[in-house]
Image (spheres, helix red, strand yellow):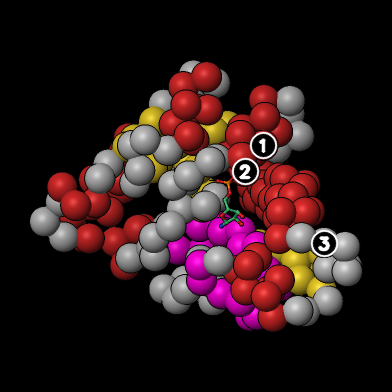
Amino acid sequence: MPNLAVFASGNGSNFQTIADHTLNGRIPGDVVLLVTDKPGAYAVERAEGMNIPVLALAPKSFESKQAYEQAILNELHAKDIDFVILAGYMRLIGPTLLSAYSGRILNIHPSLLPSFPGLHAIEQAFEKGVKVTGVTVHYVDEGMDTGPILAQQAVEIDELDTLETLEEKIHAVEHQLYPAVIAKLLNQKLEGARHNDC
Ligand code: GRF
């Protein structure tokens, strides 16, 4: 089974959902590490509740981003991590992690990219008055929410929606779409590996 590391900086609801899907067998992989840049994040409590090891490193305690990412990379290698799943990790991934995990880092973003990249995407879509927004799962490259898109799902904003109800709708879609995309990707990789074995 592929080993997954989930990176999260906050609440960790996507982390929890993904971990749940590995435990009930709907994602053919194991979440073996939570990486966070915010040691006080609620995601850490969720991981502890699920007995998933946590790597909590404060970037400020390193002399450079390169050194910070190298420390993470050492742990990814120690745990034989195959894929990195970003789930509300509020930092750009730098060259150290990108080159080591090229094509193996995924992210979820709460808008239909390329609309509303970066922070506060749900608020921006709501305030702009768009009628349709959504969720994007994409590969990570050096840009901010710019990598190749794997899947998108639309969410309509209707007249009765408030920012809060829109956030709920977006998160509900995230919790379905992200595990489904991860499961599909891992199944494809496992299938490919089986063919190569023949
Ligand atoms: C999600 O909306 C995700 O799309 C964005 O950050 C949020 C993380 O939420 N990248 P949670 O921490 O998984 O609850």
Query: As displayed, is residue 8 above or below residue 56?
Result: below
**Residue 68 in sight:** yes
Separation of residues labelled 2 and 1 (CA atoms): 5 Å
- Mark 1 sits near ligand 1, with its Cβ under 8 Å away: yes
Mark 3: secondary structure: loop
| Magenta extent | 102-119
Residue ID at (39%, 65%): 92
- Mark 2 sits near ligand 1, with its Cβ under 8 Å away: yes
Mark 2: secondary structure: helix
Q: Earlier in the sequence, mark 1 or mark 3?
A: 1
Residue named by callout 1: 17
Query: As displayed, is residue 58 above or below residue 54?
Result: below
Residue named by callout 2: 14
Label drawn at residue 161 = 3
Q: In which quarter of the image is residue 101?
A: bottom left
Secondary structure mostly seen in the magenta stretch: loop
Identify which amino acid the numbered label 2 is placed on.
Asn
Identify which amino acid the numbered label 1 is placed on.
Thr
Q: Residue 156: x percent and y percent?
A: 86, 67
